[in-house]
Image (cartoon, rainbow, N blue to C red):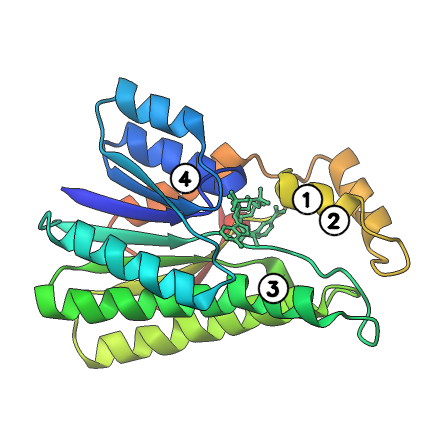
Amino acid sequence: MKYAIVTGASKGLGEAIAKRLINEQIAIVSVSRTENEDLKKLAQEKKTFYHHFSCNLSLEKEVEEVFMFINHYIFEKEPEEILLFNNAGIIEPIENVGNLDLTPMVRNIKVNLVAPILITNLLFKEAHLASTPIQVINITSGAANRPIEGWSVYCSSKSALNMFTKTAAIEQKEKKTKNKIIAFNPGVMDTKMHETVRTAFKDAFKEIDKDKEYKKKTRIVQVEDAANYLIDLVLSGNLENGKVYHMKEQ
Ligand SMILES: NC(=O)c1ccc[n+]([C@@H]2O[C@H](COP(=O)([O-])OP(=O)(O)OC[C@H]3O[C@@H](n4cnc5c(N)ncnc54)[C@H](OP(=O)(O)O)[C@@H]3O)[C@@H](O)[C@H]2O)c1
């Protein structure tokens, strides 16, 4: 059986990814601070495996403990393949450099970058022993390649996530493993994260007006479309190791 670990499956893109995977009869391990009851119900209806683990991804010790447990739990079931979606992410702090506070700055780097690195590392380690193929999908952003005023920490964490993806992919190719690691930029989606952007202080985020224009011109991607595009890609079995995919390519 295929297993998928989805971080941030409680809402937004993560929820849509988990729903599509449940419909594909892929077993789901959901990881976030809160649980999404709809996912649980859908899995019951579809008679698919679903388990939620509560974890705060900004606390590295907790991440290590929870994922060591998750890995043990999944590998015991002798999975045919494991898909890891490092999807959970936060945009804050939205603030100019010089006005950044330490706590939200560090939290952003921990959730967006440290947690995906830590989780991938633990999974590759365990997979090596069990020779189970792993596909890692790191959810990135267009902001990884484009400086946006007020978003210095988010742009930096996503840019570093892309570089981690490319580097880890080279290593896996060199080792001739069956593991693949890619990044996926879903485009601008109307989720809770986007709500945070829209309510940010104008001084700190000059692009707000442009963002409102985005909405008017309906350049907003529906989470279901992004999830379907991504899952079609992953299930095609043709992922190019180390590539940063963009929703816009469709
Ligand atoms: N929205 C956009 O326009 C957009 C554009 C490009 C890229 N992205 C990327 O797409 C991904 C999903 O974003 P989204 O828009 O779906 O965001 P969202 O609706 O705000 O959902 C974020 C998810 O991350 C989880 N999360 C946040 N902090 C966490 C923490 N400390 N510990 C554990 N889980 C945590 C949340 O779960 P809990 O609150 O239950 O913990 C939630 O499930 C992110 O990586 C984001 O950077 C989004």
- Label 2 element class: helix
Q: What residue is disc 2 on?
A: 197
Q: What residue is disc 1 on?
A: 194
Q: Is 226 placed left or right of 27 in the picture?
A: right
Residue at 28% of width from left, 68% of height from top? 122
- Label 4 element class: helix
Q: Could you tell me the amino acid type at mark 4?
A: Ile
Distance from Cα at disc 3 to Cα at disc 4: 22 Å
Residue at 60% of width from left, 64% of height from top? 107
Residue 103 pos. (x, y %): 67, 67
Query: Is there CB contact under 8 Å for labels 1 and 2?
Result: yes
Distance from Cα at disc 4 to Cα at disc 1: 18 Å
Query: Is there CB contact under 8 Å for labels 3 and 1?
Result: no
Which dot marks residue 17?
Answer: 4
Distance from Cα at disc 3 to Cα at disc 2: 15 Å
Label 4 crowd (10 A; few <14 / some 14-19 / many >=20): many
Q: Earlier in the sequence, mark 4 or mark 1?
A: 4
Residue at 81% of width from left, 50% of height from top? 200
Query: Is there CB contact under 8 Å for labels 3 and 2?
Result: no
Mark 3 vs mark 2: in front: 3
Q: Is mark 2 within 8 Å of ligand 1?
A: yes
Q: Is mark 1 within 8 Å of ligand 1?
A: yes
Q: What residue is disc 3 on?
A: 108
- Label 1 element class: helix
Distance from Cα at disc 2 to Cα at disc 4: 22 Å
Residue 160 pos. (x, y %): 53, 74
